[in-house]
Image (spheres, rainbow, N blue to C red):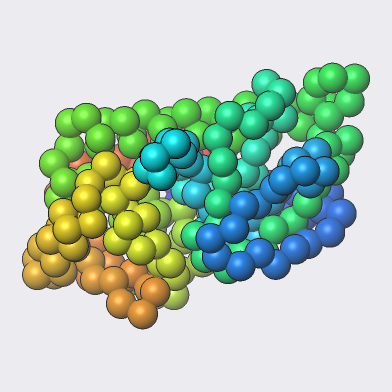
Amino acid sequence: MATELLRASAEAEAFARLRTCVACERLISARHAVASGARAECLHLVISGVVARCRRFADGRRQITALILPGDVCDLADHIRGGNVLDHVTLSDCRIGEIPRSALFADGGLRPEWSEFAIRMLAREGEIATEWIVSLARRSAYEAAAHLFCELWVRMDAAGQTDGQSFAFALTQADLGDALGMTSIHVNRTLRNLRNAGLVSVAKKRATIHDLTALRQVADFDPTYLQSNSREVTRS
């Protein structure tokens, strides 16, 4: 519990610091690109809602490679390496804060006062990506879905976006399929199995965790990979 409180405090502090850099806020409805044209010169902070980072194929298929939640910056890695490799699309109605590139970067690189934040954020993104690869390659559909719900619960709770054991869940079954590498039919069956086991239910765009301890056991979920952005938490 102390570790989770420290992590939540660290994330709240980082979020508050980023909010001071926001030049303007935009409301973007679901299923729209976060940035295009001149807006690509800004960094984009998710204030509310959920954004998907995804790779699209010419035939219309896509793979969601990350879910970006309140408090996260969509495109920090893009600005560091130069150029947008993946798309960022809203999965729900979102409030997005635009941060001028000059607030975090100068003379072609990160400002020193932001370097540690960037290292922590990118380290956590890498750890999350690793767990997603493990889910795609080795976890069963049931385990992978359980793991994703555990991850979302921890991240949403740290962002202050939970209400009891539930949180906003705007992902459709097609979205879940694109994130977990399943067909919509397989997702439907897996969600039904999780519900019948008394672990998770999804209704009216909310997910409810009914037994977090059992869900973590099913997923073999260890939340420490989500703590890379906070030295204080890592030492706990």
**Residue 62 at least partly seen:** no
Q: Residue at left 34%, top 47%?
A: 178
Which of the 4 image quarters holds residue 193? Answer: bottom left
Q: Is residue 118 left or right of residue 128?
A: right
**Residue 222 at least partly seen:** yes
Q: Residue at left 76%, top 32%?
A: 114
Q: Is residue 18 left or right of residue 156?
A: right
Q: Residue furthest front?
A: 59
The one of 98 and 19 positioned closer to us in this rendering: 98
As displayed, is residue 126 above or below residue 186?
above
Image quadrant in which the N terminus is located: bottom left
Q: Residue furthest bottom?
A: 204
The one of 11 and 86 positioned closer to us in this rendering: 86
Which of the 4 image quarters holds residue 211? Answer: bottom left
Number of marks present in the image shown: 0
The one of 227 and 93 positioned closer to us in this rendering: 93
As displayed, is residue 81 above or below residue 100?
above
Q: Residue at left 9%, top 70%?
A: 196
Which of the 4 image quarters holds residue 160? Answer: bottom right
Q: Is residue 100 left or right of residue 80?
A: right
Residue 170 screen position, x and y as percent: 43, 67
Residue 227 screen position, x and y as percent: 47, 39
Residue 214 screen position, x and y as percent: 16, 57
Q: Is residue 29 left or right of residue 213?
A: right
As displayed, is residue 101 above or below residue 159?
above
Q: Residue at left 17%, top 31%?
A: 138
As displayed, is residue 178 above or below residue 96?
above
Residue 228 screen position, x and y as percent: 50, 33
